[in-house]
Image: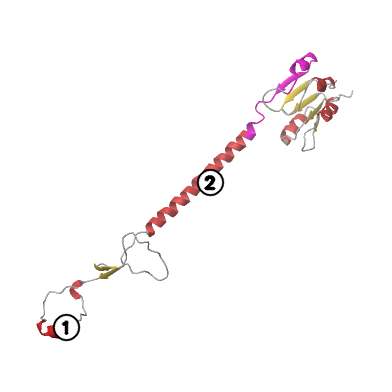
C-alpha cells in the first residue's frame, strides 16, 4: 500500500532547520527566488498542495482559496492573519494559524548585536579615558633639579609645545649660596665695592 505524503509549499526562504522539520512529516517545497511569488504564481502553487506556510505579505484571499482544492492548513510566518480571508478559509474547512515566535531568533540576533555594539562602545570609551589620563600626566611639568626660580621665560596661559628642542620655561639656580654673578660696574665705583655687600640683580 502506497501512502502519499502531504505537500507543503513555503512562500519564502526560511531557516534550513525549519525546512528539515517540515520535511520530516511532509513533502516540502520552498519558493526558490528572492522575489515573492505573484498572486498568479501563488494560485498555481496552491492548487496542488495540502499545507501552505505563507508570509504576511502574501494575500490569501477568496480567489486564492478557491484555487486550493486540496488545502487543509494555512500557517502564517508572523503575528496576525490580516492577509488571510479567515472567513472563507473556515467555510472551506481550512485551518488557519500563525507563528508568533517566528521572529524570536531575529529579535535575539538584533538584541545580541546591540549588546556587542554596546560592549565595543564601552571599550572605545575606556581607551579614550586611558588616553585622556595619559595626556593629563604629560601636562605636569617637573623640574629636573631642585632650586630657586630666578627667571620665568613663559607667560601664564601660554601653550607649551613639546618638540625635539625642549623649550626653556624657567631659569633655576640650584644653590644661591654658590652662585657666581658677572656684573658690569662703572670704573668710578670700583673702589666702593667690598666683600659682603648686598647685591640686587
Q: Is residue 117 left or right of residue 86?
A: left
SS at mark 1?
loop
**Alpha-carbon neighbours of circle 2 within 10 Å: few (<14), some, or many (≥20)?**
few
- The alpha-carbon separation of the residues under discs 1 and 2 comes to 74 Å
Give residue 186's mark.
1
Q: Is residue 51 left or right of residue 192?
A: right
Q: Which residue is mark 2?
A: 120
Q: Quadrant of the C terminus?
A: bottom left
Q: Does the magenta segment cover residue 119?
A: no
Please tell me whether residue 136 is drawn above or below residue 86 in the rendered image: below
Question: In this picture, is 150 found above or below 99?
Answer: below
Q: Within the image, what quadrant is residue 56 found in? A: top right
Instruction: Please report the bounds of the magenta region as a residue range.
Output: 83-106
Which disc, if any, is residue 148? none
Q: Residue at x 83, y 30 (%)?
A: 41
Q: Quadrant of residue 19?
A: top right
Amino acid at each position: 500500500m502506497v501512502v502519499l505524503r502531504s505537500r507543503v509549499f513555503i512562500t519564502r526562504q526560511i531557516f534550513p532547520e525549519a525546512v528539515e522539520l517540515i520535511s520530516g512529516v511532509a513533502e516540502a517545497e520552498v519558493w526558490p527566488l528572492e522575489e515573492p511569488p505573484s498572486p498568479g504564481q501563488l494560485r498555481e502553487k496552491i492548487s496542488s498542495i495540502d499545507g501552505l506556510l505563507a508570509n504576511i505579505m502574501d494575500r490569501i484571499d477568496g480567489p486564492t482559496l478557491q484555487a486550493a482544492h486540496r488545502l487543509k492548513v494555512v500557517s502564517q510566518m508572523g503575528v496576525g492573519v490580516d492577509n488571510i480571508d479567515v472567513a472563507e478559509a473556515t467555510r472551506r474547512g481550512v485551518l488557519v494559524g500563525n507563528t508568533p515566535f517566528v521572529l524570536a531568533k531575529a529579535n535575539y540576533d538584533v538584541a545580541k548585536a546591540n549588546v556587542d555594539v554596546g560592549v565595543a562602545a564601552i571599550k572605545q570609551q575606556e581607551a579614550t579615558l586611558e588616553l585622556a589620563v595619559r595626556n593629563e600626566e604629560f601636562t605636569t611639568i617637573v623640574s629636573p633639579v631642585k632650586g630657586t626660580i630666578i627667571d620665568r621665560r613663559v607667560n601664564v596661559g601660554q601653550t607649551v609645545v613639546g618638540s625635539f628642542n625642549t623649550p626653556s620655561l624657567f631659569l633655576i639656580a640650584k644653590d644661591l649660596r654658590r652662585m657666581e654673578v658677572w656684573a658690569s660696574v662703572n670704573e668710578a665705583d670700583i673702589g666702593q665695592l667690598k666683600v659682603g655687600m648686598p647685591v640686587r640683580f
